[in-house]
């Protein structure tokens, strides 16, 4: 089915950087998200800006189930990256982003579509521009997605479980990576710390260099 039949396109807020932005969230301002706040399919509320609330229409505030999308970027790789909005938020988004707001489809199911290889391939084929890559409203609303009727909820449950397992595995890999680094420092000292107390021996203390007819080779000392 065509995406425009089951989700509404909402464009981002247009503003003047020198006049409408603030470094702090003061009275009359609202948090503004940009493409850098979309990471790995999720919203990251770091490094945000604040824009004059008068520039923001009510429909440009994030709603539960929205899909926030990077619509313009100098990097084609970043165009189309998307994040699921888990709850209503008093937060808006800039003109280089847009939102697809579900109105006739399971929002969670739609969020998984925006992380799929099929979506990524479609975006790479449609984004255009000589100096900047852009996604127009029609590029998104004309996307075709599969519908599964009453099975959609079951599919979402299955994908949710798979994502939880993947997140758990990634956390374990990160911990193992930290363990490897800490063991390296424990055994060989911190290469970034010139005052490290761990002994550092030169390679010539346990190896000797022998020059052969086809190059050099390190061999282990026998004494």
Image (spheres, rainbow, N blue to C red):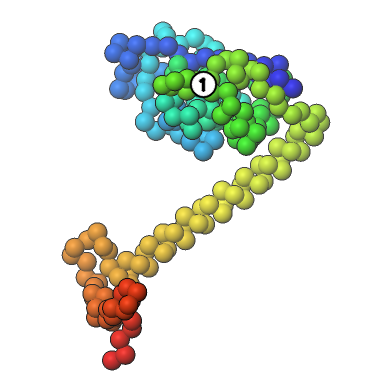
Most extreme residue toward the bottom is 223
Q: Is residue 63 visible?
A: no
Asked if 2 appears above or below 218 in the picture, the reply is: above
Residue 184 occupies quadrant = bottom left
Measuring 47% from the left and 23% from the top, which residue is drawn there? 133
Residue 1: percent from left, percent from top: 74, 22
Residue 89: percent from left, percent from top: 51, 23
Q: How many marks?
A: 1
Q: Is residue 8 visible?
A: yes
Asked if 73 appears above or below 16 in the picture, the reply is: below
Residue 18 horizontal side relative to residue 54, left or right: left
Of residues 147 and 54, the one drawn nearer to the viewer in this rendering: 147
Of residues 105 and 87, the one drawn nearer to the viewer in this rendering: 105
Q: Quadrant of the C terminus?
A: bottom left
Measuring 80% from the left and 34% from the top, which residue is drawn there? 151
Of residues 64 and 184, the one drawn nearer to the viewer in this rendering: 184
Residue 217 horizontal side relative to residue 34, left or right: left
Most extreme residue toward the left is 195
Residue 56 horizontal side relative to residue 22, left or right: right
Q: Secondary structure at mark 1?
A: loop
Residue 63: percent from left, percent from top: 57, 21
Asked if 40 appears above or below 140 in the picture, the reply is: below
Measuring 18% from the left and 65% from the top, which residue is drawn there? 195
Q: Residues within 10 Å of mark 1 (few under 14, many from 20)?
A: some
Most extreme residue toward the front is 213
Residue picked out by circle 1: 128
Measuring 51% from the left and 38% from the top, which residue is drawn there? 40
């Amino acid at each position: 089915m065509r995406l425009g039949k089951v989700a509404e396109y909402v464009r981002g807020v247009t503003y003047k950087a020198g006049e409408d932005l603030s470094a702090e969230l003061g009275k009359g301002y609202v948090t503004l998200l940009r493409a850098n706040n979309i990471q790995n399919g999720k919203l990251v509320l770091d490094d945000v800006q604040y824009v004059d609330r008068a520039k923001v229409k009510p429909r440009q505030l994030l709603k539960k189930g929205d899909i926030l999308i990077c619509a313009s970027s100098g990097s084609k790789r970043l165009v189309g990256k998307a994040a699921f909005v888990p709850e209503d938020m008093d937060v808006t988004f800039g003109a280089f982003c847009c939102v697809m707001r579900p109105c006739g489809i399971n929002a969670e199911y739609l969020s998984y579509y925006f992380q799929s290889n099929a979506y990524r391939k479609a975006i790479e084929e449609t984004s255009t521009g000589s100096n900047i890559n852009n996604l127009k409203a029609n590029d998104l609303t004309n996307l075709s997605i599969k519908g599964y009727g009453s099975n959609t909820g079951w599919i979402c449950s299955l994908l949710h479980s798979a994502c939880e397992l993947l997140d758990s595995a990634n956390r374990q890999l990160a911990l193992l990576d930290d363990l490897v680094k800490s063991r390296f420092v424990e055994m060989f000292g911190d290469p970034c710390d010139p005052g490290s107390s761990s002994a550092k021996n030169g390679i010539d203390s346990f190896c000797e260099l022998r020059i052969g007819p086809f190059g050099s080779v390190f061999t282990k000392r026998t004494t």
